[in-house]
């Protein structure tokens, strides 16, 4: 209730009885000294208070003090409507005091006076008289005052309220208790003339008052000193808008300031609004500015930061290209400038120099001409015929290079075709490259700060002070209503002469101009989760950005990002601003909610005026600015890691990485924004083939069956699960599936698949009468493959083997369709387009005899011997359209080749070699007199098949092939220069035939269920399961699988069917082996269904039952037989 109950002095002692007896005399002497008292007059000098808690709705209070000492109480006069009262009064208490050791304390209580309610108790403090200054001779020493101290207030313990009182205590000794002492001298400090300079820039972010926005706000400044009050008032203003008014005034106020800086009064600021035509001027905000640190003779003096202000040249963008097109973009934001051409005063922005404008036009025209005329200046190849026609003269005289070229027939270039073996990139070369290509272009030479830029600068050119309203105590049901309603921005200093120059040139400051503000937001990390987690998963947030500058708001709610605490933003937000003006760039990170209002995760505020008018910020990164017309770059401002806060918590709620650019409209037109956008999301197809399993622990063990009804589930993060078919009654843990799964995934910096690049596998035992049992699970990390595929837009065979995709790629790279090397093909057709097989309308034709003969000599794989002029055609990484071999030869057609060039049976290969299926036999479209040999492409390791209408084919003759190859090799050696580096000798035809034979044997062994060969480009994954009793993962079997990753457009060119559906290729998936088969033999069928052990037990039981039944029903006959025999 605020009533002071008094104080109690105690002295306690603890010890043994013997010790108590020994110290009893000392205790008695202490009591005697305490009872011995001397007369004193206690003088309490109360000077002033500061920062007292607001107790009234206007943000002020009507304070008074109650002072208690030894049962006496003095109540001081109240001071109206202030949080920094000046009392300068001395309170006198005539008391008798014991020795200093036992002197009492002075209790001082603070109250707020209320006219229609009980006074509010706001806090108290104690002053110990042991620290008081003792005056022995009142006539001589009464004017000597001790140095006062600031005593903080508290309710019950230190720090539970705010405010301080400046007081000091003085003890004047009296000869007798009845002695009358003279009145104490005044305690007002000595003063000296000073001049207070106030540069009122304006108020920022003024909130509505009584539900109405600001109309015509203005400011009142008041200094209350011991000599009286001095006041100054600004003009009303609503430019650029009433919520962010610019006053732009320099006020010189003469004041009397104390010579002792501790008595320096504060500068009071009152923001008022003009309403009802001036009949009502309510106070809409209150604030103070301490002046102690602004006195030049103060120990805490801080000189004004004059060197921080940017020069006129820096703010005008000296030596900066002011526009690429000569026109300044309009800064037409609601809270920004009126137009780019002029500010409030109508003054135009600086125009481009005419010579500079003409230079820009010439550069642009020259660039357009180069793009039209120079084929190297554009990305698209130029049409040679159009180029020749444009360069040549109008008359065909044949003179000149281009005139002569009119008569040159330009052959139509052949477009290369890609086979399936060309799709997969060489992993050795792919992963040999460094993943880190260095920072992006916008981060080059850009400094990254560990925190806010304000922490780096420490000081700002302008001073900002908060204005408040509301009360902190006695707010009723809602509690405290104290709140920040505006911010005053300006400069305050104390001068000894009113003729001193201003802190800086006010010309630029007092003329607002329009600017472009670019906010680059890169990432927000460590965000506080706002949504609850379910199923053991941690909570997440759905963040998005809201950026506000004046009345302009950017809301990115539609682009919220789901379930993250570290979010990649990478966007640039461009706003219009007028400086001086609305300068508080408010950045909020919000959490999206489907039900209810969105939650604030955290916010940070950037003051644009403090940066624009700060020469340190103006010069930061200016050395990296590029002003070349063809390659421009703005100054590299630093990346800040700004901590996000909420009003109810002083702890950071996350970190936002961003930087800010401020430029004039002309500069914004000349310097485009940095491209910080993330690469686009790319669509990929993930192909997974489940081949087989082994060593799977059986789950059906009843009766010794030891089998599983096995199936496998797989899925990458962010995709639905897919299951294989069920291998019913799988024995010995060996399951066979040969099952393909296709998953459409998105790869990109923000995608779930890229952030969690895991491929999950599970093996299950299917049950018909109860739930299925999870046998084991496993997971692989595909992160490095996802990153490489996304970065290169490449197709990757994850587990390629030397005899799988790598061998096909090498074969495709060694030979071409015409028998030459791939390097020669690349040199000749470097600019050719690469098309899929179905897009090639011009298959390579051997139209001339010379070309046919060269095909024979240069290594055509197959050679027809049915006629004199057989056409040898070898296959590279190409698929062929139907060929026409001249008029005499019949039309020869070849059935379509699978996209990969072969049909592989990975599950059934014998020794890990590739097994291929021969091409379909050619069909004769007519009667051919001369044979045509057609060889398989290099993707197919099968020998070429000879086909002819007039004689038997001899394409499989190894001797003939060797001879043809020797001739081709001799011809190449004679024409080619000596090799620089010796390469290993290629494999002979006999070695290839042996490899094919081994692969064929492996295929048949796999089809018959023999052999343990693994498919090509596959690997084994050890599966396990967690034992919850021992918390140990137990091995439960292994899974053989393959993984391919390719861009979606490539997957559409080379389609495959799910499971084992058509098109069943790349690789070919044969039917699984070891599956359940129907049989009329009950013993075989029973063994398949129940296992050999359980089947034997069941049949033994059945035979026993049949025997018993036979004995029962045949008992009469047996009795008769026994009777007859015996």
Image (tube, rainbow, N blue to C red):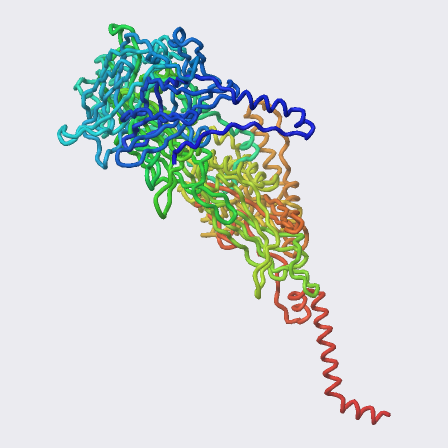
Q: Is residue 967 left or right of residue 3?
A: right
What residue appears at the point 54 percent right and 42 percent down from the top-left corner? 939
Foreground residue among 1101 and 846: 1101
Could you say where residue 621 lies in the image, as x and y percent from the top left?
39, 17
Q: Quadrant of residue 728?
A: bottom right
Q: Is residue 948 above or below residue 216?
A: below
Q: Is residue 981 left or right of residue 1098?
A: left
Give the position of the C terminus as an image quadrant: bottom right
Give the position of the N terminus as an image quadrant: top left
Q: Is residue 464 above or below residue 967?
A: above
Could you say where residue 795 lies in the image, as x and y percent from the top left?
50, 39
Q: Quadrant of residue 977?
A: top right
Q: Residue furthest right?
A: 1126
Q: Is residue 1077 left or right of residue 173?
A: right
Q: Quadrant of residue 260?
A: top left
What residue appears at the point 62 percent right and 55 percent down from the top-left corner? 735
Residue 1050, can we see it?
Answer: no
Could you say where residue 52 lies in the image, as x and y percent from the top left?
35, 26
């Amino acid at each position: 209730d605020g009533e002071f109950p008094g104080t109690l002095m105690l002295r306690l002692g603890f010890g043994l009885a013997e010790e108590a007896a020994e110290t009893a005399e000392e205790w008695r002497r202490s009591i005697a000294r305490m009872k011995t008292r001397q007369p004193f007059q206690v003088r309490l000098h109360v000077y002033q208070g500061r920062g007292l808690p607001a107790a009234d709705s206007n943000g002020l209070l009507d304070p008074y003090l109650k002072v208690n000492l030894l049962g006496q109480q003095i109540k001081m006069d109240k001071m109206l409507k202030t949080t920094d009262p000046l009392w300068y009064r001395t309170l006198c208490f005539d008391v008798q005091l014991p020795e200093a050791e036992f002197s009492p304390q002075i209790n001082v209580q603070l109250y707020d006076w209320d006219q229609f309610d009980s006074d509010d108790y706001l806090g108290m403090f104690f002053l110990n008289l042991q620290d008081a200054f003792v005056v022995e001779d009142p006539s001589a020493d009464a004017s000597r005052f001790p140095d006062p101290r600031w005593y903080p207030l508290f309710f019950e313990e230190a720090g539970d309220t705010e405010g301080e009182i400046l007081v000091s205590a003085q003890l004047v000794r009296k000869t007798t208790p009845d002695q009358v002492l003279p009145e104490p001298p005044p305690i007002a400090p000595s003063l000296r003339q000073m001049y207070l300079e106030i540069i009122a820039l304006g108020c920022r972010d003024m909130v509505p008052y009584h539900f109405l926005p600001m109309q015509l706000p203005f400011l009142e400044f008041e200094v209350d000193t011991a000599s009286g009050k001095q006041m100054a008032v600004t003009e009303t203003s609503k430019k650029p808008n009433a919520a962010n008014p610019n006053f732009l005034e320099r006020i010189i106020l003469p004041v009397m300031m104390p010579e002792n800086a501790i008595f320096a009064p504060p500068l009071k600021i009152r923001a008022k609004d003009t309403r009802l035509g001036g009949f009502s001027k309510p106070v809409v905000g209150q604030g103070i500015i301490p002046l102690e640190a602004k006195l030049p003779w103060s120990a805490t003096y801080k000189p004004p930061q004059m060197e921080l202000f940017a020069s006129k040249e820096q703010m005008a963008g000296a030596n900066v290209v002011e526009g690429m097109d000569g026109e300044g973009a309009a800064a037409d934001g609601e809270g920004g400038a009126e137009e780019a051409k002029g500010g409030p005063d109508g003054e135009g922005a600086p125009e481009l120099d005419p010579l500079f404008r003409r230079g820009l036009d010439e550069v642009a025209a020259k660039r357009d001409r180069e793009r039209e005329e120079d084929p190297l200046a554009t990305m698209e190849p130029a049409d040679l015929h159009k180029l020749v026609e444009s360069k040549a003269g109008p008359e065909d005289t044949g003179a000149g290079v281009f005139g002569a070229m009119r008569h040159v027939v330009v052959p139509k270039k052949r477009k290369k075709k890609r086979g399936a073996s060309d799709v997969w990139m060489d992993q050795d070369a792919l992963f040999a490259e460094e993943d880190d290509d260095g920072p992006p272009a916008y981060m080059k030479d850009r400094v990254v700060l560990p925190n806010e830029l304000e922490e780096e600068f420490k000081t700002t050119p302008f001073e900002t002070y908060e204005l408040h309203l509301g009360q902190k105590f006695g707010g009723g049901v809602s509690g405290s209503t104290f709140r920040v309603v505006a911010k005053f921005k300006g400069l305050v200093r104390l001068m000894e002469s009113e003729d001193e120059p201003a802190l800086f040139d006010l010309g630029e400051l007092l003329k607002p101009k329009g600017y472009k503000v670019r906010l680059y937001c890169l990432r927000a990390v460590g965000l506080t989760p706002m949504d609850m987690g379910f199923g053991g998963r941690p909570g997440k947030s759905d963040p998005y950005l809201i950026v506000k500058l004046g009345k302009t708001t950017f809301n990115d709610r539609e682009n919220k990002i789901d379930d993250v605490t570290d979010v990649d933003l990478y966007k640039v937000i461009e706003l219009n601003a007028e400086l001086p003006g609305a300068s508080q760039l408010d950045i909020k990170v919000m959490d999206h909610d489907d039900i209810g209002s969105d939650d604030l995760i955290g916010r940070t505020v950037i003051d644009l005026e403090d940066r624009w008018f700060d020469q340190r910020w103006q010069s930061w990164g200016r050395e990296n600015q590029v002003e070349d017309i063809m390659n421009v770059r703005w100054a590299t401002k630093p990346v800040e890691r700004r901590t996000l806060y909420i009003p109810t918590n002083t702890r950071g709620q996350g970190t936002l990485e961003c930087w800010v650019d401020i430029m004039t409209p002309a500069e914004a037109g000349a310097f485009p924004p940095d491209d910080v956008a993330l690469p686009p999301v790319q669509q990929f197809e993930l192909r997974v083939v489940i081949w087989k399993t082994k060593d799977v622990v059986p789950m059906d063990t009843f009766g010794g069956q030891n089998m599983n009804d096995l199936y496998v589930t797989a899925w990458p993060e962010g995709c639905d699960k897919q299951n294989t078919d069920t291998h019913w009654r799988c024995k010995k843990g060996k399951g066979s599936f040969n099952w393909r799964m296709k998953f459409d995934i998105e790869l990109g910096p923000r995608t779930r698949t890229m952030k969690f690049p895991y491929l999950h596998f599970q093996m299950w035992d299917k049950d018909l009468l109860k739930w299925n049992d999870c046998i084991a699970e496993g997971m692989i990390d595909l992160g490095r493959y996802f990153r490489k595929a996304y970065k290169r837009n490449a197709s990757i065979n994850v587990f390629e083997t030397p005899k799988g995709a790598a061998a096909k790629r090498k074969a495709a790279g060694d030979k071409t369709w015409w028998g030459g090397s791939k390097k020669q093909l690349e040199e000749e057709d470097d600019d050719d387009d690469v098309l899929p097989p179905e897009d090639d309308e011009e298959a390579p034709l051997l139209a001339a005899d010379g070309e046919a003969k060269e095909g024979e000599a240069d290594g055509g794989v197959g050679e027809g011997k049915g006629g004199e002029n057989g056409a040898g055609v070898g296959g590279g990484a190409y698929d062929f359209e139907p060929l026409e071999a001249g008029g005499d030869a019949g039309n020869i057609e070849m059935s379509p080749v699978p996209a990969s060039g072969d049909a592989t049976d990975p599950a059934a290969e014998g020794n890990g070699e590739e097994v291929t299926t021969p091409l379909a036999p050619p069909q004769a479209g007519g009667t051919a007199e001369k044979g045509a040999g057609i060889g398989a492409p290099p993707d197919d390791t099968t020998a070429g098949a000879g086909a002819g209408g007039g004689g038997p084919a001899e394409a499989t003759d190894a001797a003939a092939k060797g001879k043809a190859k020797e001739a081709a090799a001799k011809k190449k050696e004679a024409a080619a220069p000596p090799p620089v580096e010796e390469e290993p000798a290629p494999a002979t035809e006999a070695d290839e035939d042996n490899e094919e034979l081994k692969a064929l044997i492996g295929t048949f062994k796999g089809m018959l269920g023999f052999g343990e060969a693994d498919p090509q480009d596959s690997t084994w994954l050890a599966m396990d399961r967690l034992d919850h009793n021992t918390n140990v993962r137990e091995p439960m079997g292994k899974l053989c699988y393959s993984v391919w990753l390719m861009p979606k457009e490539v997957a559409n060119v080379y389609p495959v069917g799910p499971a084992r559906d058509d098109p069943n290729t790349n690789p070919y998936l044969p039917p699984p082996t070891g599956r359940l088969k129907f049989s009329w033999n009950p013993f075989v069928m029973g063994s398949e269904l129940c296992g050999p052990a359980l089947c034997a037990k069941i049949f033994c039981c059945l035979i026993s039952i049949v025997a018993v039944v036979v004995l029962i029903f045949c008992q009469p006959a047996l009795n008769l037989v026994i009777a007859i025999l015996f």
